[in-house]
Image: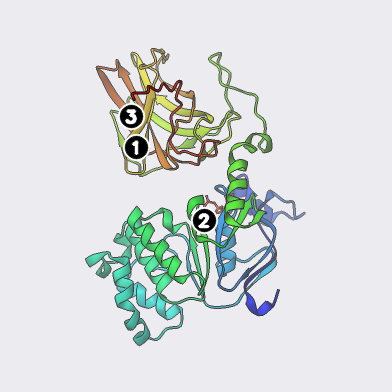
């Protein structure tokens, strides 16, 4: 390839982190006279190489923790690779994690000027762009407030407005589109469409529809390695198949299934994140929740009809009479789309006092439309008609429905029979 046409050249990039079991191990390692090592090496990126041409729009996909953000941070120079190198030709404007590049104590306006100046613009040049940035961000009087008072939605509005208005040669956007509301997402996509072809654009998204529609090319990273690089529709199909079908064969097998015979299951439970809305009297508390496949691997992307397990970890502070454990699945607008619990199924659950228990619900993922959904676990006691709510955690888990079934209809229902009657 003619190097003049290359915007980004990533050559054999590897990024490793040292993982220590305990914080004190780091100190022990640095002081050890015989240079004993106390760490294990973790490869966040492993020998990645590719080129991006000027003017290409590239989508980056990969499951959580696969190395996408690490790669973007290395390209923007926020992180250094352990080995290998990256050459970037052109001015980069990046929207990485929320907060990066903004001073929380400064107002929105002050941050616009700060970012513009970092990009090499004079004050007068930023004055000219200001109206466009303000109208794109559309956050009203908040623009005069310190950005630390912003909601994540407002923040991303301003950050995207700034990053896309400073006329970079390369625009890098890490998952910002998943934060804003749907109208704002559409607006950002229109802006990306306007810049497409004129600028080099890299963006991370879990939305394969967006990647397929807007990108010329898609790069798929899996466990730090390049798994695919090519036409978005082609890569998205392989990725979907991988995330559903081959998940079971590539992940470790785990034969310890849950039973009521006091066998200890070996699944990993995600603790409830601080800051979520929780209701109830705390006689029982949901400690954590995980959506798993049948091999007890955590999943965040599932297909309708896929066999899944939902495990809810509950801490009881006292013996409850007729405990009810259940969950609601809500769409991104907060509508309950489906729900269940043990009481409605006439299944009794035992609880003998102060204890921690995992409750595993095994079910097929309902036939929902593609998109993001949340799961809200709850513990109550009593009957369906008359019960006390002990703990309800709103939106404890987020997951995505990606339909990989052979039926080309979203949210379809199985029809047992079709009758038809000729009237004329
Ligand atoms: N400072 C660090 N120390 C140790 N491990 C790290 C560090 N930063 C990232 N990692 C690990 O590197 C891996 C890649 O992380 P990265 O954030 O790049 O993934 P990602 O694909 O962007 O994930 P997500 O889709 O969840 O944002 C993860 O397993 C993460 O835990």
Residue 321 percent across, percent down from the top left: 33, 13
Specify the quadrant that holds the N terminus: bottom right
* Residue shown at 40% from the left, 78% from the top: 116
Is tag 3's residue or tag 2's residue first in the polypeptide sequence? 2
The extreme right residue here reads 34
Classify residue 125 by image quadrant. bottom left
Front-lying residue, 343 or 382: 343
Residue of label 3: 391
Residue of label 2: 211
The 10 Å Cα crowd at callout 2, few under 14, some 14 to 19, many 20 or more, is: many
Q: Is residue 128 above or below residue 80?
A: below
The 10 Å Cα crowd at callout 3, few under 14, some 14 to 19, many 20 or more, is: many
* Residue shown at 34% from the left, 25% from the top: 424
Tell us which disc is closer to us: 1 or 2: 2
| Numbered mark located on residue 394 in the image | 1
Q: Is residue 329 above or below residue 276?
A: above
Front-lying residue, 149 or 247: 247
Residue 162 percent across, percent down from the top left: 39, 71
Taking the image as shown, residue 380 lies to the left or right of residue 296, namely: left
Is tag 1's residue or tag 2's residue first in the polypeptide sequence? 2
Q: CA distance from mark 3 to mark 2?
A: 39 Å
The extreme front residue here reads 424
Query: What secondary structure is marked by label 3?
Result: strand
Front-lying residue, 314 or 135: 135
Residue 296 percent across, percent down from the top left: 58, 30
Q: CA distance from mark 1 to mark 2?
A: 30 Å
* Residue shown at 62% from the left, 23% from the top: 256
């Amino acid at each position: 390839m003619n190097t003049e046409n290359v915007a980004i050249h990533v050559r054999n990039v590897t990024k490793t982190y040292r993982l220590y079991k305990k914080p004190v191990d780091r100190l022990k390692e640095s002081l050890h006279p015989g240079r004993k090592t106390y760490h294990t090496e973790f490869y966040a990126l492993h020998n990645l190489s590719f080129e991006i041409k000027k003017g290409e729009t590239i989508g980056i996909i990969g499951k959580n923790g696969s190395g996408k953000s690490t790669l973007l941070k290395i390209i923007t120079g926020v992180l250094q690779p352990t080995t290998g190198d990256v050459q970037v030709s052109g001015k980069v404007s990046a929207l990485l994690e929320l907060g990066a590049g903004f001073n929380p104590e400064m107002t929105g306006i002050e941050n616009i000027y700060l970012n513009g100046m970092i990009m090499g613009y004079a004050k007068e040049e930023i004055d000219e762009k200001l109206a466009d940035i303000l109208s794109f961000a559309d956050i009203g009087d908040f623009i005069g407030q310190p950005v630390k008072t912003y909601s994540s939605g407002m923040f991303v509005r301003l950050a995207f407005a700034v990053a896309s208005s400073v006329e970079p040669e390369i625009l890098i956007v890490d998952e910002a589109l998943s934060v804003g509301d749907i109208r704002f997402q559409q607006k950002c996509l229109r802006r990306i469409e306007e810049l497409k072809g004129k600028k080099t654009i890299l963006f991370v998204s879990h939305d394969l529809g967006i990647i397929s529609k807007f990108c010329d090319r898609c790069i798929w990273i899996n466990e730090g390695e390049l798994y695919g690089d090519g036409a978005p529709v082609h890569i998205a199909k392989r990725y979907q198949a991988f995330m559903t079908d081959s998940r079971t064969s590539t992940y470790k097998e785990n034969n310890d299934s849950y039973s009521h015979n006091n066998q200890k299951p070996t699944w990993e439970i995600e603790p409830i994140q601080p800051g979520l809305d929780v209701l109830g009297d705390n006689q029982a508390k949901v400690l954590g929740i995980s959506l798993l496949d049948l091999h007890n691997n955590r999943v965040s992307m599932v297909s309708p009809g896929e066999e899944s397990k939902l495990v809810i970890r509950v801490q009881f502070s006292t013996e409850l009479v007729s405990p009810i454990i259940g969950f609601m699945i809500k769409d991104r607008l907060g509508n309950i789309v489906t729900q269940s619990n043990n009481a409605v199924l006439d299944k009794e659950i035992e609880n003998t006092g102060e204890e921690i228990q995992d409750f595993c619900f095994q079910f097929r993922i309902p036939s929902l439309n593609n998109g993001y959904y949340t799961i809200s676990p709850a513990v109550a006691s009593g009957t369906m008609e008359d019960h006390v709510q002990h703990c309800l955690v709103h939106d404890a888990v987020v997951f995505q429905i990606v339909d990989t079934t052979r039926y080309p209809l979203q949210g379809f229902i199985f029809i047992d029979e079709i009758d038809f009657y000729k009237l004329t």
